[in-house]
Amino acid sequence: MAGCSQRCRQGIFKFLQCLHRFVSGTLSKDKVDDELEMTMVCHRPEGLEQLEAQTNFTKRELQVLYRGFKNECPSGVVNEETFKHIYAQFFPHGDASNYAHYLFNAFDSAHNGSIKFEDFVMGLSILLRGSVREKLQWTFNLYDINRDGYINKEEMIEIVRAIYDMMGKYTYPALKGDVPKQHVDAFFQKMDKNKDGVVTLEEFILACQEDENMMRSLQLFENVI
């Protein structure tokens, strides 16, 4: 599972770079657009005080996040195609579309095909400032593609394969097509404590807490902003 964990950590590093540039509003914009967008972001989002109470961010941090969000998404809403386009900029040697699809669904808490600022900041609050259990539960929901409350082996293979595709064929070491399945088989066997063919939230959390590589990966999210 070491190769899989290493590649997952590489993906997380890229994800953090994407988050940092996204929240600072420096992904891609020209001077004219910047002046226009800066005018637009002078207005506070509705419910700023409520978001401060619901998240682990201060009011100042929420203002910074809102500025970056509006600079990249002036309409205030991100659809899946825009999200994929933004994410693809950080993985030029791979195909990030599948992983971006799953990540988008994880942020889209209302399941309506769009991410509002509130959705975005609630997810970031968990990833960046949440407890270990909260971060692992968010990750569990990412793997639980069909949202039935369990992770089956096929779902885990889908996510892991998407991570491998995202990192690209030029990433060392080169991987054969069946490697994601081999890694998932080994990790799934460790997670599925009662051998019923699915992984529950509690089984997932317990197995991840016992895995040093996973815990190191979670620590990467701390103090990003």
Image (tube, rainbow, N blue to C red):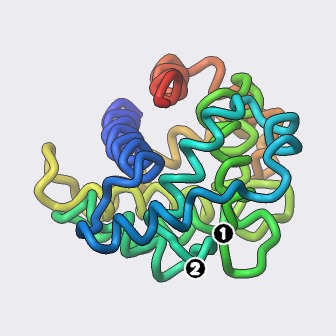
- From the image, tell me which residue sits under label 1: 115
- From the image, tell me which residue sits under label 2: 79
Q: Looking at the image, do the residues carrying marks 2 and 1 touch, with CB atoms under 8 Å apart? A: yes
Q: Amino acid at mark 1?
A: Ile
Residue 188 to residue 111: above or below:
above
At horizontal 47% and vertical 20% (from top left) the residue drawn is: 216
At horizontal 61% and vertical 34% (from top left) the residue drawn is: 61
Residue 196 to residue 166: above or below:
above
At horizontal 34% and vertical 38% (from top left) the residue drawn is: 13
Look at the image and tell me in which quarter the N terminus lies. Answer: top left
Q: Is residue 220 left or right of residue 77?
A: left
| Front-most of residues 180 and 8 | 8
Instruction: Give the quarter of the image for residue 57.
Output: top right
Do we see residue 148 in this rendering?
yes
Q: Residue 27: percent from the left, percent from the top?
A: 31, 59
| Front-most of residues 118 and 37 | 37
Do we see residue 152 in this rendering?
no
Element marked by disc 1: strand
Q: Is residue 130 left or right of residue 201?
A: left
Instruction: Give the quarter of the image for residue 37.
Output: bottom left
- Looking at marks 2 and 1 on the same chain, the residue that comes earlier in the sequence is marked by 2
Q: Residue 110: percent from the left, percent from the top?
A: 82, 70
